[in-house]
Image: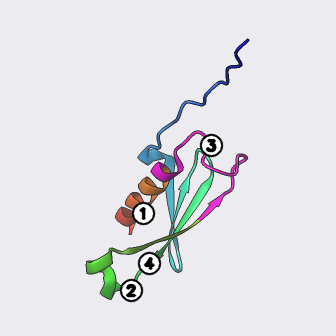
């Protein structure tokens, strides 16, 4: 008898899933569905024209019960968090 596993259907993040906070060194994006925190450092103003306002080096903390982005694609959540954080600056 074949054994079937129920696959989780991937969910996609929406802009309204994020809240932002100004921090001393940059911006923190909070993805509410999974309580994931993405901290982006602010670059020096002299680097903005060449690299943008935020560093792509991100610190991630998953505070929700699953310890990750659960049914959301982590790369997709990170990409949207960065894009929206740059707009927020």
Q: For the residue labelled by badge 3, is the local secondary structure a helix, a strand or a loop? A: loop
Residue, disc 2: 44
* Label whose residue precedes the other's in the sequence (2 or 1): 2
Counting residues from the start of the chain, the first of labels 1 and 4 encountered is: 4
Instruction: Calculate the distance from the C-alpha at mark 3 to the C-alpha at mark 2.
Output: 34 Å
**N-term-proximal mark, 1 vs 3:** 3
Q: How did the renderer colour the structure?
A: rainbow
Whether label 1 touches label 3, CB < 8 Å: no
Among the 4 quarters of the image, the one containing residue 82? bottom left
Residue at the spot of label 3: 70
55 sits left or right of 39 in the view: left
Indicate the quadrant containing the N terminus: top left, top right, bottom left or bottom right: top right
Task: Name the quadrant containing residue 83.
Answer: bottom left
Q: Position of residue 67 (x, y in %)?
A: 69, 51
> Disc 3 or disc 2, which is closer to the eye?
3
Number of on-image labels: 4
Q: Is residue 74 above or below residue 88?
A: above
Q: Which mark is residue 42?
A: 4
């Amino acid at each position: 008898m074949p054994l079937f596993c129920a696959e989780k259907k991937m969910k996609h993040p929406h802009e309204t899933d994020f809240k932002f906070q100004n921090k001393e060194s940059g911006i923190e994006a909070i993805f509410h569905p999974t309580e994931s925190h993405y901290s982006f450092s602010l670059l020096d103003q002299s680097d903005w024209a060449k690299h943008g306002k935020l560093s792509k080096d991100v610190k991630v903390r998953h505070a929700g019960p699953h310890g990750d982005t659960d049914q959301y694609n982590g790369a997709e959540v990170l990409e949207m968090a960065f894009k929206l954080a740059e707009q927020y600056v």
